[in-house]
Amino acid sequence: MYIITIDTGTTNTRIKVWKENQVIASSSIQVGVRDTAITGSKQTLQQGVKTAIQQALENANITYNDIKLVLASGMITSNVGLYEVPHITAPAGIEELAQGMVKVDIPEVIEQPIWFVPGIKNNIKDINIENCESMDIMRGEEVEAFGIIEKLGVKRPALVILPGSHSKFIRVDEQNKITSCVTSLAGELLSVITKNTILSNALEGSFVNQIDAHFILKGAQHARKVGLNRSCFTVRILDQFTSYSTQEKANFLAGIIFGTDLLAIKNSSALQMNSELPVIIGGSRSLKRIFEVLIKSDHYFKGEVKVIDDELMKDIAGFGAVTIARKRGLL
């Protein structure tokens, strides 16, 4: 029995072919919901997902007839995805997501029906300027969070951190339900500043690839003292008047940007953070390490800090989707 999982974000789609809880083949394509948002048509997204599925099947040396189940999660369930599925309102666990799954036929993509996993939204009504900070949404990170919970056997409240273009901070309660989330533009902001501002020359358009805890913490310290805007420009000062390396300056900027996220974690009315709460950190290798440095050096955080292994994170979105499908009784 083979299962296909589709994980579509803003700019990329990742396909995995599963057999007995193991990924046997995969493919990816630079097509995402941004293409729909720009063109106003789903045709590019449909064709891109179809192409990626065909490639994954070829890599697995199987055909469409071998596929038992097709699962989709992420931004593919949004209004600019293949099919819009309403968010489930928090608190929500695997059971709620399983019951919220929607079965849709999209023959332009694949002959088999696709089961879409919904996203989650915070439980805030009548949004206005006074309470908007408490509201948040996610599509895709919920399957990653539940994949992590299942893999690690989490049985207690925790904060799950999934840094990326849009970093997510997810509060999980003692019943393994997501009670709320908070989103930051940190990764996207870091990319824009690094590649599309006056700092591009100082950083040579490069991100952190070698962690330097000293410069990360110095960047975070500057941001706490004089704010984000001034601290960012300080990277140019360092470039003009010091001999620090490109990587040292990149670490300094990463500390500025991601250090500011700690303010959101501590002060967000959505998360209702407790300093004793265990912290689980996922994401790419460099981003995981940046958050590990920041959190372990901040005296506010007193709970255990767990950094997820790269190998576990690699297929976690698909694993989470499969776990939810099993709860629905599809497996």
Image: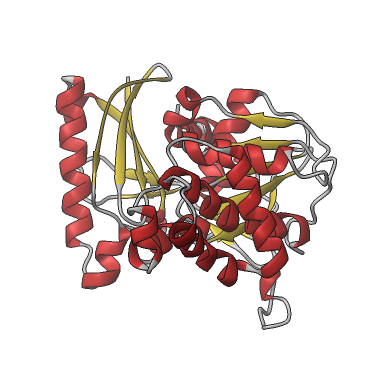
Quarter holding the C terminus is top left
Q: Is residue 328 left or right of residue 198?
A: right
Q: Residue furthest bottom?
A: 129
**In this view, 309 is above or below 84:** above
Who is closer to the viewer here, 326 or 211? 211
Does the rendering let one see residue 172? yes
Structure colour scheme: secondary structure
The residue depicted at 58 percent of the width and 71 percent of the height is: 230
| Residue 42, x across and y down, in percent | 23, 63
Q: Quadrant of residue 213?
A: top right
| Residue 189, x across and y down, in percent | 46, 62
| Residue 244, x across and y down, in percent | 48, 47
**In this view, 110 is above or below 58:** below
Does the rendering let one see residue 95? no
Q: Is residue 231 left or right of residue 317?
A: right
The residue depicted at 69 percent of the width and 55 percent of the height is: 221
Q: Residue furthest top?
A: 20
The residue depicted at 67 percent of the width and 24 percent of the height is: 153
The residue depicted at 53 percent of the width and 47 percent of the height is: 163
> Looking at the image, how many numbered discs can be counted on the residues?
0
**In this view, 168 is above or below 224:** above
Who is closer to the viewer here, 67 or 157? 157
| Residue 315, x across and y down, in percent | 42, 30
Quarter holding the N terminus is top left
Q: Is residue 238 left or right of residue 69?
A: right
